[in-house]
Amino acid sequence: MRQVMNIFLNIGRNPLHFLRSPVDIYVSIAKKKSVHTNHCLYQIPQKMGISLQDLVKRLQCLAPLNLAESWDNVGLLVEPHSDKTIDSVLLTIDLTEDVVNEAINVGAQLIISYHPNIFKPLKSVTQSAWKERIIIQCIKNGIAIFSPHTTWDAMENGVNDWLASVFEPATTKPILPNTENSNVGMGRYVTLNPGSSLKKLIKDIKTKIGVSFLRIGLGKGKNFDDTIQTVAVCAGSGASVLNGVKADLYLTGEMLHHDVLDATQNGISVILCNHSDSERGFLKTVKNILSDQVLTVSVSSVDKDCLTTV
Ligand SMILES: [Zn+2]
């Protein structure tokens, strides 16, 4: 009981400490469950898992929900059970029916879908629309859904810091800092030290994101050998954060034609790498943060950007 109490006492102090506290319990139970047979002197038990409520608290320690943009819809979106133990989590950027089937196949009890699968208010939950069928399938199979979306964009070492980390060595700060904590906020303004040619940065971005093609709008009067000193970065759809920011280069997932035209006519080069490809790589970081002896965390193998270059 003392160990269980310690878990709760650690909430809000150190999410990683809280994350690892159940290990002691796991180890002690593993020892109690050990059996002696002719073939195996020490039987490894199945993972204990943790309650959905505790896992949600852990996710909120990692990225508080009040970091979300006001228009967003984040947090626990589907809760089939209130008392189910979770030992397997599937991470995805978009929640499609293929991803739900994958979650069923791997035995996940929670899907963390970066983009919220419920955004506009639902008027029905029927079999006639794919987003509604997803909710039905998840509830039927006891799978909860949590969406962090812009809380992960804003958090320190979140999606935008992951994307901005392609530019190193550099100093990085939020473009639109949070009023209470200037280390978190939307977008990242990167000052490279030293600067680097656009040609080299294109190569680095492809490697970091794991894509073969990027779209680039060259700033007026600029060329690929020019030195880039400053970059404004925004994962996903960046125009609302990037428009009007003075930088040598914009890096984002997608922008409308007229926003790209405006930037390039002002001498700013723009690199677009597909909306979700600018976000997906961060899931590996989350997998490493959440995985431990009580929780198996995997990244979806079927989740991918819906656009491809041919
Ligand atoms: Zn997005």
Image (cartoon, rainbow, N blue to C red):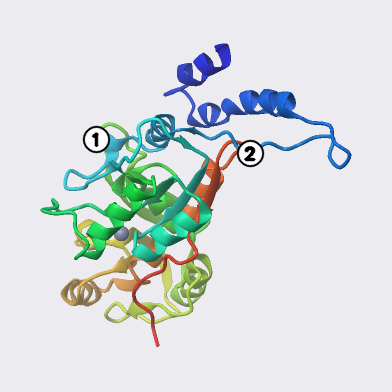
Residue 296: give x, y in percent of width and height: 56, 45
Q: Nearer the viewer, residue 224 or 151?
A: 151
Q: Measuring from the top left, give residue 69's x and y in whole percent.
A: 22, 45
Which numbered disc flags the more N-terminal residue, 1 or 2?
2
**Is 4 rendered above or below residue 44?**
above
The answer to the question of whether label 1 and label 2 lie on touching residues, with beta carbons closer than 8 A, is no
Residue 119 in view here: yes
Which residue is painted at 55% across and 40% down in the image?
Answer: 295
Q: Position of residue 113 (x, y in %)?
A: 36, 52
> Can you say which quadrant of the picture contains the C terminus?
bottom left
Please give the name of the residue rendered at 84% of the width and 39% of the height, measured from the top-left corner.
40
Q: Residue at label 2?
A: 46
The outermost residue toward the right is 38
* Tag shown at residue 254: none
Residue 66 sits in quarter? top left
Residue at the extreme front of the image, as rendered: 38
Residue in front for this viewpoint, 269 or 179: 179
Quadrant location, ligand no. 1: bottom left
Residue occupied by mark 1: 179
Instruction: Depth check: give the residue in front, 268 or 307.
Output: 307
Report the residue at 20% width, 73% height from top: 256
Q: Is the residue 261 above or below the residue 208 in the image?
A: below
Ligand 1 neighbours mark 2 (CB distance < 8 Å):
no
- Residue 280: in sight, yes or no? no
